[in-house]
Image: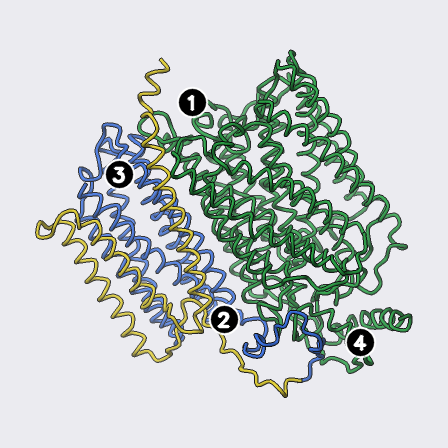
Chain colours: A yellow, B green, C blue
Amino acid sequence: MSEQIEHLHDRPDLAPGDEEEVRIGPRLLGYLTGLGLSLLLTAISFFIAGTDLVWQPSIPVALVVLAIAQMGVHLVFFLHITSGPDNTNNVMALAFGLLIVFLVVGGSLWIMSHLNHNMMPMEQIMRMER
Amino acid sequence: MLGKLDWSAIPIDQPIPLIAAGVVLFAILAVLIWAGVKGHYPYLWREWITSVDHKRIGVMYVLLAMVMLLRGGTDAIMMRAQQAVAYRSDGYLPPEHFNQIFSAHGTIMIFFVGMPFVIGLMNLIVPLQLGVRDVAFPTLNSVGFWLTATGALLVNISLVVGEFARTGWLPFPPLSELTYSPGVGVDYYTWSLMISGVGTLVAGINLVTTVLKLRTRGMTYLRMPMFCWTTLASNLLIIAAFPILTATLAMLILDRYLGFHFFTNEAGGNVMMFMNLIWAWGHPEVYILVLPAFGIFSEVVSTFSSKVLFGYRSMVLATMAICIISFMVWLHHFFTMGAGPDVNAIFGIASMIIAVPTGVKIYNWLFTMFGGRVRFAVPMLWSIGFMVTFIIGGLTGVLLAVPPADFLLHNSLFLVAHFHNVIIGAVLFGAFAGYTYWFPKAFGFRLDETTGKAAFWFTLVGFYATFMPLYVAGLLGMTRRMQHYDVAAWRPWMIAAGVGTVLLTVGVALQVVQLFVSIRRRDELRDTTGDPWDGRSLEWATSSPPPVFNFAVLPNVTGEDAYWRVKEHARQREFDTREPDYRDVEMPRNSPTGFVCAFFATVMGFALIWHIWWMVALGGVGAFATFVVFAWRDHDEYLIPAADVARIDRANLAARRAALNVAGAAQ
Amino acid sequence: MTETTYAYAQGDPHRLRGIQEAAVVHEGPAPKRIVTAYGFWIFLLSDIVMFACFFASYAVLLRQTAGGPSGAQLFDLRSTAAETAFLLLSSFACGLASIAADVRSARWFQAAMALTCVLGLGFLFLEAREFADLVGRGAGPTRSAFLSAFFTLVGCHGLHVSAGILWLLTMMAQVFAKGFRADILRRMLCFALFWHALDIIWVAIFSVVYLIGSGT
């Protein structure tokens, strides 16, 4: 039946959280690298938050960037999410989740700031009612 | 000892809820006693209550939905009756009662009719269409169903013990805050939905994982039936949206129980935040309801036009587009709250854009019918009724998506007519189409055609007679949820709507009659082959009802409309008489986990509503213990020997071949 | 093994054959480990959406201190740093436990899980102390909308960690009683996903709530 078409049998997907590597040594190294990078990024975050050495308005941006970087470190080294074809479903699900997060958080902030801007403060309304 | 609960919670002084409660309690007791006397309890426990079979759970979901349709419909009849008579009069329902009725009506119809109906049909059919034996997490499936039932139970208990929310089906603060709703009504609402929300989320996880990870050999994504695609999209929305509902209701609960200030008037709370978040859930929710209905129509239209679905790839694209865009339109539910022209314009445009993929679907269904041999069986009637009705509802929706128009029509009866137009036209008609279409698969006999057609016509005409007057009244300025009014111009429309309600009620009653008639005539209506409609997808390759393992051997799929190819092949050549290689089949073991878990959830929910803290703790411990006991079991599957599989399958195949050979010879 | 082929590719009404020839053959339902872990992965994503709502509320209500104290006046960053260290190290310990489970070493597994537990409890202890301290200073969740949002966001995370500890102890008991059975290994995979995800959420919390919050 399938004689005329050469079928590539699809490689089984990886479960999210599983990694291809099975030897203890490299796996341990992976976790240690993740730990080291995370500690480094955390230390930098705390340092930047408290220092006077950088331009102050840039601090929130820097902290967000560092947080995203550390989340990436966790995803790669602890959760073993990679860009390989055996991980596609896992990455797609994550991307969908992140899209929703950005829509909800971003959308809410945008909408609420407009609403708050146009709306009288609640205390003022309550005072009017009395 | 019992928190806020005392004898005054029972509404002895209010005749209407008392009588309603009496009727319901009597009906429940009658059923329980009859079942006990007939000795059905062991069977019910073994085969249904502890079942983890997706087919059984799907049937129970649909049964829950149909029972709750009666309750929600009764609320609707009461509301229509009140508005028909309450011109310059107080009518027969005092305001605090009327408010509970419209709140309960909306809550029940959305959460305990719409959701269970579509989830039930998806549960029943998707594993069969994908050619596999069950969903990804069978025991979790049972838990999800029973938690949904718990939510429905709590809402109904509020009829007898205490009161329900008076805030509408979405409890907007500050009205829903403790200051303005000090009673237990809003608490019944929030806890009921928190519990059933867990159930819905569980169903969402189950169905997404099933569609993505459990398909039979050869069934790539683009060979799945359209119903499976819409299942995927709808359940992705469940996973994405229901956490928002959970979070928002949690914040309201924290305000009410622990004195937090998320949505209060004092201490910096922001009531608009509630509206924003609840509609960020609420809009995807309606797409969760409608997408499976679209999938049902794709199946039904294709089968009863005897033609492959037109434009399969564009249907898939349209479905996933609707899935994504549905998360970008939610502000159109509160254009008038004051976000300003920029924000309103963007969301208004997005709301219009989402009509485009829906339009694509309608054209595809029409083109499927065009050139086909259309059979006007009951499911097809529902589909055609849907197409006409939904188009009207969709058009009024696009009208409302224009912010300046919405400023006049927001919260008027025009809006009420619009959303009933689309929900009844798509979700309810789709549910009835799916129910009629797949009933023989679930039970082995078809539904009576005559009563089915009568039910359809009464429902269709009744719908128009009830809701078209509401459009007019809305354009004449009538606001929604009015307990009484004194504008003469609205009166004839309210009376017309009342008459229409009678027709609708007859339509729903005929559905019940149809069921009884069909059961009585079931031997004449028997489906012997498993394929009563000349279907195209794999569920029709099984017997009716399918054996517990669905397929003796998982099918190998090489194209779309998998089962149609089998029949084409069988008609053109000798049917393949080689026996399949029967193997032992492992099936998941039944478990009382779902039922017991829901029992403790009911206890906890009731205790939380009435502030009975020791009972909350007990319920919590019980739920955790159930979980641990379940996790500790050693045997979660049981074996069906190959000989049994072979025996069942041979019988089914024999019946099927006989019917196909007869059909082939006749051609 | 012979299987009855139910279909024979005759017609191709949608001219999809081109796509199908290039496509890989779908081998059938995925193995249980993948199915279980994927379902749990999706659940985690739904949980992250829920946290996103609490984050959104926090961001909206950030300035609503109702005349009361703001983040800058309340947060003790040394405590935050310690909590971060505890949770991060516990994540690492959990990774060790995963490796131990994969090589079926019960001793290393129980040791690593115990370490994870202790570090997790340390995190919870510090957080509970911080909350109690805030309440004692009149800056409890009922003081203002900002504080309601703060306690809910951080408290929700803390509740998840607490639930995780209960799950952790249950896993240790299960491995002790039944060894490394296939279903227990699947649960361990899910637990690891859960524990690491909690640390990811904590990264967002300490960065946005505590660090950015203490600067404003």
Dot 4: chain letter: B
Q: Amino acid at mark 2?
A: Ala
Q: What is the crowding at mark 2: few (fewer than 14 residues within 10 Å), some, or many (at least 20)?
A: few
Q: Dot 1: what SS?
A: loop
In the image, taking residue B209 as reference, residue B498 lies left or right, namely: right
Instruction: Please report whichever mark, 3 or 2, sits nearer to the chain's N-terminal start.
Output: 3
Q: Nearer the viewer, residue B28 or B470?
A: B470
Kindly indicate whether the residue at mark 3 contacts the one at mark 1 (C-beta within 8 angstroms). Answer: no
Q: What is the crowding at mark 3: few (fewer than 14 residues within 10 Å), some, or many (at least 20)?
A: few
Q: Nearer the viewer, residue B184 or C113?
A: B184
Q: Dot 4: what SS?
A: helix
In the image, taking residue B584 as reference, residue C113 lies left or right, namely: left
Q: Dot 2: what SS?
A: helix
* In the rendered image, residues at marks 1 and 3 fall on the same chain: no
Mark 1, residue position: B179
Mark 4, residue position: B570
Res C132 → quadrant? top left
Label 1, label 3: how far apart the Cα atoms are: 27 Å
Dot 2: chain letter: C
Q: Which mark is residue C132?
A: 3
* In the rendered image, residues at marks 4 and 2 fall on the same chain: no
Mark 2, residue position: C182
Q: What is the crowding at mark 1: few (fewer than 14 residues within 10 Å), some, or many (at least 20)?
A: few
Label 4, label 2: how far apart the Cα atoms are: 42 Å
Q: Residue at x 58, y 60 (%)?
A: B316
Q: Nearest to the eye among marks 2 and 1: give it.
A: 1
Res A25 → quadrant? bottom left
